[in-house]
Image: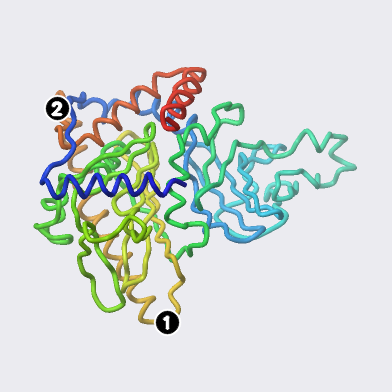
Amino acid sequence: MSRQQLIDMTRSLVAHGEAGTMELADDVVRIPASSYTDEALFEREKKQIFRRLPLMVAPSCELPNPGDYKAMDICGVPLLLTRQKDGSVGAFLNMCKHRGNPVAAGTGNATRLMCGYHGWTYKNDGTLVGVASPQDFGAVDKAALCLTRFPVYENAGLIWATLDPQSTLDIADYLCGYDDLLKAFGFESWHLFSQRTLSGPNWKTAYDGYLDFYHLPVLHANTFGADFYNRANYFAWGPHQRLSTPTKYAVKVSSDDDMQLDLTTVADDDLSYEVLVQGVWTIFPHISIASFYGGGLRGAMISQLFPGDTVGESYTTQFYVMEHEPDDEDKIKAAREQFDFLEVVVRDEDYTTGKRQHEALQSGMLKEVLFGRNERGGQVFHQWVEKLTDASDEQLKEIFAAECKQAAE
């Protein structure tokens, strides 16, 4: 992790804040409205983006202990994550090699996973260890019938997996060094306080909102407030972006009150990591990370977005993680109130608006939508969606090799 990179970004934001400026894109960009409504394109995006690129499938604190497991479905692919004896994470196709029945459901802790159909049993490292009634079934090579492995990678307190067992795209290359910057949060030792899943609109409609500060004082006037900032500068590592407000101030949180901290008065060596990671950090194609404080306790909401069954549907799991587990009723209540507040903001404001927007776009009466010069994050996102949807497997490797090289320079 480069602390200096974080300091440089912060000083850039401070300079823009003092000057009353922001970084602007070169021009207004037009995106076909059908990009949100075309069913054939939607299916292609699920295949080319979500079933081919690395996805952040869980925060590490969701599987803190050896034996912990999590089963989930992503775009029709049943995924099983396990925390193995040595502390590493395994990612598997959640299908028994006998008939394809899932070997686990939901979450839990187990060193052995038994298929509920015929009783075949696997270790949590994917090894097939038991065939029911082997004397009747017949001879099989158990070593050849282990659970199918997916590429998996854990860093910065986050877990990525690629839902293609044949993928040769290195997950670390895909992240372009971005994961090392995410270490500044310190998620490796954080606590998962709570989580829930919300229904949303088309996945790109939903994700647009995470890349957009422009709407904050309008759509969220009754929650965040009408005087909330609406400007954001963007920093990019390949398709992954950080959005943060160009200002010389940061929120300083104490046990008693919140106050503004003038960053022009703070030396680089004294800048805390809490200040250095302010803003919204997005991991392409479906993650948003934003810092919050419940009763003065440091936390973050990690929003994990996936396409739904149809072009107009998506679902988002919100993970509220905390630097320290609340240890008394008042702290628990404050954290719960913060998480409940964020549910209202996303469910009742962002996603309700997104669903109305999608219904209107489905009329076909609007041919294109606009992303202004002050909405560079959205511009970049849609450019990367199109680029990666159209790229071949070999081109993916070339694209991210080049991005890694550029990030390292």
Residue 83 percent location from the top left of the image: 63, 53
Residue at the bottom extreme, as displayed: 329
Task: Please say if 399 is above or below 211.
Answer: above
Query: Residue at 27% of width from left, 60% of height from top?
Result: 266
Q: Nearer the viewer, residue 222 or 25?
A: 25
Residue at the right extreme, as displayed: 135
| Amino acid type at mark 2 | Val
Instruction: Classify residue 361 as left or right of residue 54.
Output: left
Instruction: Classify residue 331 as left or right of residue 25.
Output: right
Report which residue position mark 1 lands on. 328
Report which residue position mark 2 lands on. 28
Q: Write down the quadrant of residue 201 in the picture.
A: top left
Query: Residue at 16% of width from left, 51% of height from top?
Result: 216
Residue 13 percent location from the top left of the image: 23, 47
Task: Please say if 296 is above or below 237.
Answer: below
Q: Are marks 1 and 2 in contact (CB under 8 Å)?
A: no
Residue 93 percent location from the top left of the image: 61, 39
Query: Residue at 39% of width from left, 47% of height from top?
Result: 4
Instruction: Name the secondary structure under disc 2.
Output: loop
What is the C-alpha distance between the residues marked 1 and 2? Answer: 50 Å
Query: Residue at 35% of width from left, 81% of height from top?
Result: 330
Instruction: Classify residue 48 as left or right of residue 352.
Output: right
The quadrant in which the C terminus is found is top left
Disc marking residue 118: none
Q: Which of 76 and 262 is in front in this view?
A: 262
Residue 340 percent location from the top left of the image: 30, 65
Q: Can residue 123 be seen in this view?
A: yes
